Image (cartoon, rainbow, N blue to C red):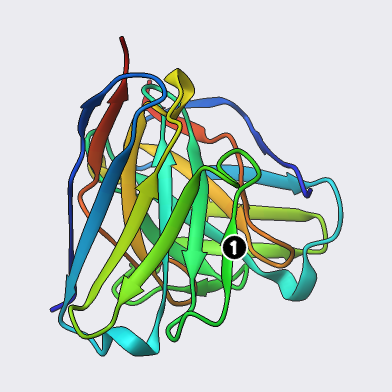
């Protein structure tokens, strides 16, 4: 069965960096776009970035462009989100999700807290 | 950017009731690329409907989606306990945007 497991979250100071990972299993990873979506405490969903199966297409939300980098390693069946210059407003639960019809499988989410 | 406005903000209903949720786009959604998700408290969202009206795998037929262009509707024919949750629409016809959500609560 399809599984997505995020890791790498935690507490970081404003201006700091963090790298999230998402390990996938149960499907042919390289065939699928993957995405990161976040949800601030008590708020709605906001898409962050997505990446095509072979890295040919990468897109970012304006709110993270220039600060976050999405990447993937198809051999390791993993997708990553490098987050730099973190701000208070980046505090959220970050979900990775498989893009199919769309977003048909989601991980359980990982909390990132940006606070001094 | 396409803005999605969901209404109402909160819907207070009883188990067995019919729920009608609206998602209105600021401009036409290309190819009716409009999806609906349900998010139960403390859980990740779950895909219910794609392409405005196609139920996702494993989604019961009490869920139905309709609409085109700028106006879309999610209907739940008979509310089950697990349906008391927050619902989001997503358009992916031009970039991606989520609506702000509709909470369906127990009356």
The front one of B69 and A19 is A19
| Mark count | 1
Q: Is residue B84 visible?
A: no
Image check: B99 left or right of A31? right
* Nearest the eye: B68 or B100: B100
Measured along the vertical axis of the image, is residue B19 above or below residue A88?
A: below
Q: Secondary structure at mark 1?
A: strand
Residue A43, above or below A93: above
Q: Chain of mark 1?
A: A
Residue for badge 1: A59
Residue B73 relative to residue B87: left or right: right
One can see residue B75 in this view: yes
Q: Position of residue B46 (x, y in %)?
A: 34, 56
Dot 1 alpha-carbon crowd within 10 angstroms: few under 14, some 14 to 19, many 20 or more? some
Q: Residue at x 36, y 23 (%)?
A: A41
Give the answer, above or below, for where A35 lies relative to A72: above
């Amino acid at each position: 069965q399809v599984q997505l497991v995020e890791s790498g979250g935690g507490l970081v100071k404003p201006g700091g960096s963090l790298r999230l990972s998402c390990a996938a299993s149960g499907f042919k990873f390289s065939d699928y776009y993957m995405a990161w979506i976040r949800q601030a405490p008590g708020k709605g969903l906001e898409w962050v970035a997505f990446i095509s199966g072979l890295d040919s297409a990468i897109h970012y939300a304006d709110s993270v462009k220039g600060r976050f980098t999405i990447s993937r390693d198809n051999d390791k069946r993993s997708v990553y989100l490098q987050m730099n210059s973190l701000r208070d407003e980046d505090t959220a639960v970050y979900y990775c999700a498989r893009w199919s019809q769309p977003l048909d499988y989601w991980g359980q989410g990982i909390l990132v807290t940006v606070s001094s | 950017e396409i803005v999605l406005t969901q209404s109402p903000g909160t819907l207070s209903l009883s188990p067995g009731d019919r729920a009608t949720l609206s998602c209105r786009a600021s401009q036409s959604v290309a190819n009716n690329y409009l999806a609906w998700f349900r998010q139960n408290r403390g859980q990740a969202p779950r895909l219910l409907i794609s392409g405005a009206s196609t139920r996702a795998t494993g989604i019961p037929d009490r869920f139905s989606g309709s609409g085109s262009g700028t106006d879309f509707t999610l209907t739940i024919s008979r509310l089950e306990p697990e349906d008391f949750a927050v619902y989001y629409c997503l358009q992916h016809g031009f970039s991606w945007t989520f609506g702000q959500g509709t909470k369906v609560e127990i009356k």
